[in-house]
Amino acid sequence: MKKIALYVLFAVFLLTSASVISEPLKKIIQPIPDYSTLQKQITSYLDEQPGVYGLYFIDIHSGQKFGYNSRTVFHAASTFKVPMNLYLYRAADNGQLSLTEQLTFTDQHMEGGTGILQNKSPGGSYSIEQLADYSILYSDNVATNILLDRLGKQNVKDFMRSLGGQVVDNKQNSTCPYDLALYMQEAVRLADQPAGERLFNNLLDNKLKDRIPEPLPPEIKVANKIGTWPPTNTYNDAAYVDHPKRPYILVVTSKDTPGYSEALAVIHQLSEQIYRYQTNRAT
């Protein structure tokens, strides 16, 4: 009888302990989110759109991800400036260059499109840090050309491959949604380091917010970099969305679209749909 009583007491202890431990564990162990429904909805939507679109999504907390045409080749346009800056700041951290080093703007660097240096006359000198800022904040093409002369385009391309880039061409400025998500993920990872923090803050503060950030609530911070290539009606955006409970990376690329306004409407639809899905999951 004593043995039975001891067994009963031990069983009660185990049951009581399990009930005490289970509550904290419930808070720590969250179910893995299922994005299959969202992925099907997005696939159906993009299949119906004129032109070619690509997409890649990463949920920061769970690591869950999905894509659409995720390794299809697209023109990178100015999204290339993200891995270029990653390489630049890593080189600075390794002592291979100084951010205060002065570089000269020459005739060969001149290029139109976006940026503020296109309105300046060649001959001026700018620090690497200032040029890096311009390349992200204003998507400055002249600043990018000056930096690439110093960094070496081949070095940047090799660096992109070292991060896991799948679509990297030594001659063409090409990419894919998967690769752009990798580069943005690396920018987020380095955000708590001195040089990485500067790049991330530039991505947050950049002046071109017409795509993924535009339809979201104004209080939501978005670190992003767009890319535009008119010859192929390409409109891209790679972004980190600081959702209050479910932050995520979203990349949308396009080509052969009817035009800017049509592509913009598609990007807005995708951005709003994914933000809403994250919000509903978090409530």
Image: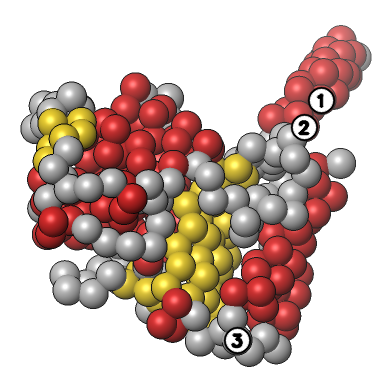
Give the amino acid at mark 1. Answer: Glu
Q: Disc 2 designates what residue?
A: 26
- Residue 147 is left or right of residue 85, and the answer is left
The answer to which of 34 and 249 lies nearer the viewer is 249
Figure quadrant of the N terminus: top right
> Badge 3: few (under 14), some or many (20 or more) residues near its Cα, within 10 Å?
some
At 69% across and 59% down in the image, what residue appears? 271
Helix, strand or loop for disc 1: helix
Provide residue 179's location: percent of width, then percent of height: 38, 62
Figure quadrant of the C terminus: top right
Q: Are marks 2 and 3 in contact (CB under 8 Å)?
A: no
Rendered view: 77 above or below 127: below
Q: Residue lying farthest top?
A: 2
Rendered view: 164 above or below 44: above
Helix, strand or loop for disc 3: loop
Q: Disc 1 designates what residue?
A: 23
- Residue 241 is left or right of residue 186, and the answer is right
- Residue 216 is left or right of residue 253, and the answer is right
Front disc: 3 or 1: 3
- The answer, for residue 72, to whether it is visible in the render is no
At 16% across and 35% down in the image, what residue appears? 125
Provide residue 71's location: percent of width, then percent of height: 42, 75
Alpha-carbon span between mark 2 and mark 3: 49 Å
The answer to which of 232 and 13 lies nearer the viewer is 232
Q: Residue lying farthest front?
A: 121
Give the amino acid at mark 3. Answer: Pro
Give the amino acid at mark 2. Answer: Lys
Q: Disc 3 designates what residue?
A: 258
Q: Quadrant of residue 99?
A: top left
